[in-house]
Structures are given as C-alpha cells and as structure tokens.
Amino acid sequence: MIRYLAMSAVLLSVAPTLAQEPGLDVEGARKAVEMSARRYAEAFAKRDPVALAALFTPEAEYVDLDGTVFHGRGVIQAEYAARLAVNPPGEIDVELLSIRPIANGVLVEEGISTFAAAAGDQKSSARYTATHVRQPNGNWLIASVREIASTPLTPHDRLQSLAWLVGNWHEDVGGNSIVTQWNWADSGNFLVSDITINRAGIETRGTHRIGWNAEQKQFRSWVFDSTGASGEGYWQMNDDGTWTLNLTRIDAEGSRSVARLTFAADGKDAMVVSLDQQISNGTALAGGMHRIVRRPPEPRPSAK
C-alpha cells in the first residue's frame, strides 16, 4: 500500500507563499502575478514601452542593477523606450521563484529574468524582486521593481521556497499516527525528513529527501522505509496554486504501486493532502483526503 507515503510526503503547498493573508484569493492573486509576468514578456517581445509601463502604478519605482532609481510611470516608460532603442530585438523569459504576501493587498514576487537576443546566442539574466499592489478595482499593478546582480541559483536557493517545511508535522486518525520531522541536510542542498508511523500498534520508520533536478527543472522526491520499500516522484505546480506529486513505490517483494497526491494549504500551519489515481499491481484503489497539522515547538523549561 502507498497510503503512508501520502502522509509523509508533506512537501509543498501554497502556505509559505499565499496563505498568510486572511481572506486572500489565493488562486486569483497567483494568476494575477503570473499574468503580469506573461504580459511583461509579451510587451518586451513587441518592443512596446507603453504596454510595459502600463503594468506599473503611476507612482511606481524601478531600480536597475546599477542602483539607478526611475520614479513614476512616465519616467519608467521613457527608460524602457531608451533601452529598447539601443538594445537588439529579443525575448524575455521570466521564471517565478516565489510569490508571498507582506500586507493586506500587497504581494512580493521574486524571480529571474533572462534576455535572449533574436540573433545569435546572446543571453543575460538578472534576479529581481517586484512588489504588486491590489488596486481599488481589484487589479494588481507593480509598485516597485529592484534588479539584483544575477548569480546561478544553487539547489539550496531553489529549496528556500520550501524552507517553511522545517519542523514537526503530524496526523492522528483513529488511534493511528504519522509524525514527520523535516530538517536541512548538512550540505544545505536537500530537505530531509524522519518519518514515524504507528498503525495498529505496529511502528514503521522511514526517510524522505527532496532535491532539485536541474535537468527536468522540477523538485524530486525519494522515500525509503524500514520494510525495504522505496519510492520516488516528481512535482508539478497546478494553476490553482496546489502542488501534485506523481509517485511510484516498489515494496520489498518487488510489487509496484503508483499514486497522485495533491497538496493544498489549510491555513498557515495545516494542509490537506488528497490521494487519487492509486493503482497497486494493476488494481485501482480508493483515494482519500487527510489533514496534516504542524506541531508547535516544545516549550523550553523555565529557568529556576
């Protein structure tokens, strides 16, 4: 059976990025930022400074790699026009790394912008942070952009979006329990967990490791347990901000099971894991839904 993997694979959700603001439309906010990134890329490819500037608030500021500040939509539009006039045609690829709220109606986006010239192999990249502010009409506009000197992202950098996992998570249902303790690996390039499962008085222990697959550009999971079983799978972000893990498990006898797990935030310190498309040795199994809660740290002993 693959059920315990669903409970122990508490890896990703929108909790660290979009769930902290009460009443926030998670799907709408994420889609708004993603749409802004697409519009930016489209306007850049068309060399349209007016369309680029329209993505900003009237009082927005743009800080480039040299630290020069361009204040106001009109000034930003003029700067784009000047850059486009001297730079070769090409396209911008925007990779979103994180989206998180910092106040009511304010989101911070972090990403990498890569320019590829239409002719030749010229490429340049820059990391950036952008602050989006919700307008009275419900639209989101950019209030601030700051470019940061580009350095290659390490696996540790990639995993920063999952750093909120570090801690103790648990599920208790019908006398059965699953406890998962997440920490950084010594190298900092993986997140690893120790898993303890108590079911019907039988304890099973396991480990789970998350890493970045640079070739596939996906997070990858490896899971092992004390029965000799192992599993691995890849992650995919969905349009609604949830994450899906397609996982394959081989037990100690060589039987194969597959399942799809979907992770969705339920407040800041809980999530709902849905399990479906579960097949074991060619037989379809029933799915399910479970709520997993972050356990607060143990209180420190009071000083005497």
Image (cartoon, grey):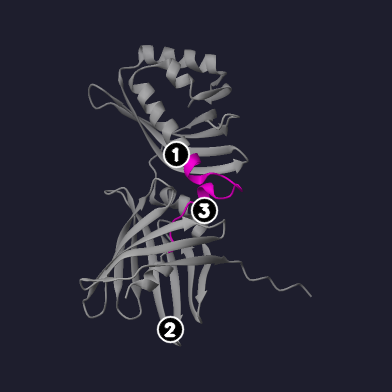
Between disc 2 and disc 3, whose residue precedes?
A: 3
84 or 55: which is nearer to us?
55
Q: Is residue 67 visible?
A: no
Residue 10 in the image, given as x and y percentages of width and height = 44, 63
Q: Is residue 289 left or right of residue 256?
A: right
62, above or below 132, in the image: above
The residue under label 3 is which amino acid type? Ala
Magenta stretch contains residue 41: no
Q: Is residue 17 visible?
A: yes
Q: Is residue 62 left or right of residue 238?
A: right
Residue sticking out furthest to the bottom: 201
The residue under label 1 is which amino acid type? Lys
Between disc 3 and disc 1, whose residue precedes?
A: 3
Residue at x 47% of width, y 41% of height: 30
Q: Which mark is residue 203?
A: 2
Disc 1 target residue: 31
Q: Is residue 110 left or right of residue 117?
A: right
Residue at x 47% of width, y 36% of height: 32
Between disc 1 and disc 2, whose residue precedes?
A: 1
12, above or below 90, in the image: below
Residue 212 in the image, given as x and y percentages of width and height = 35, 53
Disc 3 target residue: 15
Q: Which residues are magenta?
A: 10-31
Residue 270 in the image, given as x and y percentages of width and height = 54, 61
187 or 9: which is nearer to us?
9
SS state under label 1: helix
Q: Nearer the viewer, mark 3 or mark 1?
A: 1
Report the Cα–Cα distance between label 3 and label 1: 16 Å
The residue under label 2 is which amino acid type? Glu
Report the Cα–Cα distance between label 2 and label 3: 30 Å
Quadrant that contains the N terminus: bottom left
